[in-house]
Image: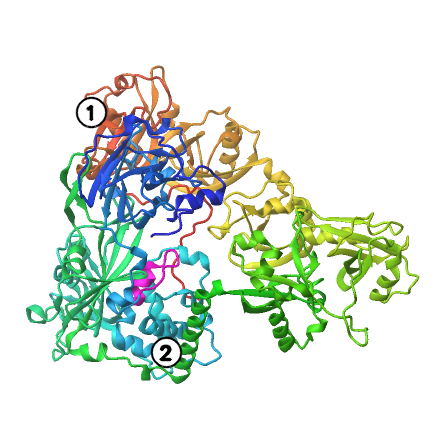
Amino acid sequence: ERRPRIHGKVQPYANVMAAVGVAPSAMEATDAASTADAPDTKMIDNTLEGSFTWTVTDYSKIREKMHYSGTFVVGGYNWRVLMFPRGNNADFLSLYLDVLNPQELPYQWSRYASFKLMLRSNVNEKLNIVKDANHLFNSRESDWGFTQFIALVDLQDPNKGYLVNDTLTIEAHVSVRPQENYYAYDSKKETGLVGLKNQGATCYMNSLLQTLFHIPYFRKAVYHMPTTEEDMPSKNIPLALQSLFYKVQYSDSSVSTKDLTRSFGWDANESFMQHDVQELNRVLCEKLEEKMKSTTVEGTIQYLFEGRITNYIECTNVEYKSTRTEVFQDLQLDVKGCKNVYESFDKYVEVEHLNGDNQYRAEGHGLQDAQKGVLFEGFPPVLELQLKRFEYDFQQDMMVKINERYEFPLELDLDRDNHKYLTPGADKSVRNLYHLHSVLVHSGGVHGGHYYAFIRPDLGDQWFKFDDERVTKEEHKCAIDDQFGGDDDSILNVNDATRLKYAKHSNAYMLVYVRAENRNRVLCPVPEEEIAPHLLLRFKKEQEEKERKKKEKAEAHLYTMVRVAREQDMAKQIGTDIFFDLIEHEKVQSFRVQEQTKFADFKLQVEQELGIPVANQRYWLWAKRQNHTYRPSRPLENAEDGLTLMQIKDQASPQQLKMNIVDLKLYLEEPNVDVIPRHLPSVNKGDILLFFKLYDPAASALSYVGKIFANTNSKVADLMDHMNEMAKFPLDQELLMFEEIKFEPSVMCEPIDSKSTLRSCQLEDGDIICFQRSLGPEEAYTYSTVPEFLDYVCHRQVVRFRKLEQPKEDELTLELSKQFTYTEVTDRLALELNIQDSSLLRLTAHNNYSNNPRPQPFKFNTPDRLQEMLAHVHQTTDILYYEVLDIPLPQLEELKILKFSFHNQKTEHVCDQIIRLPRVQTVEYLLNELKEKLKEYNIQGDLRLMEVCYSRIYKVFPLTDKLDSINDQYWIIRCEEITADDANMQEGDRLINVHHFRQDASANTVMQNFGEPFLLRIGENETMDSIKARVQAKLGTPDEEFAKWKFSFCTMGRPEPLTDADILSERFSSRRDWGGQWEHYLGLEHEDKGKRRPQSQSHRYSAEKAVKIWN
């Protein structure tokens, strides 16, 4: 999927590096590729399509963060591949397509290109990883690609064959479109249709929604679903879908799907998570079917999409037949082994013969030969065919994409060959002739890709391609023939200018057919009259509001927003919304006024709207001080009434004007309410405007109480009567006074000496004095003084705590200080949870990108402060996860927690166990503890511990190794009982590694290990004939199967066949007791029939999850 290029998503590289504070950007980086990496390339004029192969040698020796390929030319541009060998801030190989030296290209250059990047496997071409994207390359975005192309752990997996002899093979295929103004393209103007905006990874949803929208019967049913005027689209699925369909039908530009996804109950993280089209189709239809119940459109889903199949088992020798009828809303058709849709249907209804050991037990007849199969009882008006392009490959133990050529007809006849797909009792009067309506395409591989759709809304000759926001007219060949899959041999290799075959990774994934006899009903017109009046009114108002905002935006340069702050705003905000400074300007009265309006005319407008006479209005300009506070700086004189708002704004902040900041912020001074008749006080020379906040330590509350003008030569003590009046204190109340100076990066609130003059205190217009009554010696409060309270407010943080085992649900919320230590945080949490010992709590940080806990919890008392615990990659979160331990965390951290797999003497997996032991202990101590822990398995001999990964033994741990050195995060730690045969070592005997393997004929004899490896004792002169007998006895393999096994001496990943007379010990030149990845071992070559066990995972949580619609 094309996504923002953070955490495996596509985005301009420069934006990412700016976000994480890394320089230089890819566009500014010098070419780090050595000349040895650059292949010989030829300039091919006017070539708009080509491929390039980059062989990366000595991968492990690359030290540059960014590594470039040599240059190749496509479409008259010099391109190269950019690789981050160790990942771009992720544990993945990162690959991007890059334009060479973009700064040297003509001003405002751009080029739109579709490209694929492929990492080739030397084991099996089905393992090749291909990802594609489209991008408009320009000076700002000269590179584009994939941060999470392949996990580094998978890259280095020998079984997958990406990294062989420290060499990678990367291929790039680039298709450059003829020069056009991509952003100026108007889908509505060119096609009469509009697209849907991609939220990040919602292309799969967009293609499905366009398909459903262009089934008018479905659209009409959605319009008829009951909704009310009070419903909100973001919380009501029917209303969100109605709104979406209306906009797609009547808008002139692409439509957002955010309200719809919000109505599903999805958060922003879901928008960057790609799902399967088929899965979303089923879940959405089930949800709509549920919401259509007991309405006028109940049964719509069943009518359109529901067919019936009959499963049968019929005995051949007795009169017995068992049938079961089921309904379906889509059919999954095999692609592998089938050339076209008809062959898939033939396979679907293929008869299975139950005989021999597989006879059917018929009720009343015992075991009988029988025929088992499926036939269709009826097909729906709209037939949805899911093509099984993705399958699980048991040989490779992984999902693979089937890119084989698979044809589908424009006209599908399911009555062919005398109704062979139908049951005898099916209604033959219904003509099951279908016309192709939609082709949903998946481009990419199992690791990701992009979805788009080809649709012909009226079943005519014109096809349309719906690719997110862009809708284009397409020819039949592009919509049909090009989506069959298979190989494409029309690509030019820019390395040597030869034609080569290239597997198409874009192919049909879902087909939608409409039955001919239901065509008029299904593809019915949907005029405006079909939409409920209240919906029409609502949607038209929304459209008008959208047009108004659009016009406002277009005229924005002619207007300015004047934000007028008043004392009543300060009184309302201070102590609730804000505590520092005087006002939050976004929450005050605003006026949208033309910039050329005279200030005197603006005053008249204020008089009309607020009822304040012009004579009682005095305006002050706000100024941003060097300490980042924002205060009134000077009053506007009457002589300035003739200036325009533009000129006033220029005076207020010339710098902001240059930055095109449109707001003009003013403070409106009004007469004091106790002045009768009301009039503005005169301002004498030397007078300054001061603002006052009152702090109540008993309530820990701060409030705004007023303002006064005071002469700078007067003493602070002269203001105390005014302050006592404002606070309603006795006039003789002693006060503590502080000047609020700044609050970033730390609070500065300093005491004011009452005996000093305002001038000596350096007070000026707009300064703030915070005061409180003096406290007696017996009075004690949580925050006794203004500075203490403001420091608390500056650092307070509301934290949402979640249980680690329920990472999506907030359990409780606490207000804490960012300066709290780890212990202070756990103490408060323990108090809330009623846990006596806070050291039983362990905390884990939140990952903002995956919206899940981070892999590793915090260690006890680290980090130092809550502020650090909530920080994540230059962002801040308010979520922490907790778990309650059975022992205190400091004790737990002194222990090594090991996950291990116990195997019996036949190498069979018995159980998985977790054990906790002191880190300082040895492997010998661990094995003694394990023997006691596993005594139920009647262990007779000693135990040994080994490191296993990808079905190979990498290490047998010496008894003296410390437990702290064992890593069970990436390796499987296996414990097994040493057999009596292995324990009976004689002089000249040795232990060797024995691994199972298979060879894929198409993989050039590259070996793939599987199953459970083991150690075996061999004698100094022992022949293979003897060793084979002991291997069979150890594994308990039946004779018939064991006879098919081949034995080889394997070295450096290559097998050398062994005969029964060979003396195996002569092949082992090394005297080691264990073998590593490329060391020598005895290989057992045979078919893999064992059960799969999952490899150890490096993370505790996975971001992948099934599609769910919550509302």
Q: Position of residue 721 (x, y in %)?
A: 88, 62
Q: Amino acid at mark 1?
A: Leu
The image shows residue 486 at horizontal and vertical percentages of 16, 50
For label 2, the residue is 292
N-term-proximal mark, 2 vs 1? 2
Query: Residue at 31% of width from left, 46% of height from top?
Result: 109
Name the secondary structure under disc 1.
Answer: loop
Of residues 786 and 442, the one drawn nearer to the viewer in this rendering:
786
Question: Is 361 covered by the magenta stretch?
Answer: no
689 to 1066, vertically: above or below:
below
Residue of label 1: 1058
How many labels were placed on the picture? 2
Q: Quadrant of the C terminus?
A: bottom left
Bounds of the magenta segment: 195-210
Residue 263 picture quarter: bottom left
Asked if marks 2 and 1 touch (Cβ < 8 Å), the reply is no
Viewer-proximal residue among 321 and 1003: 1003
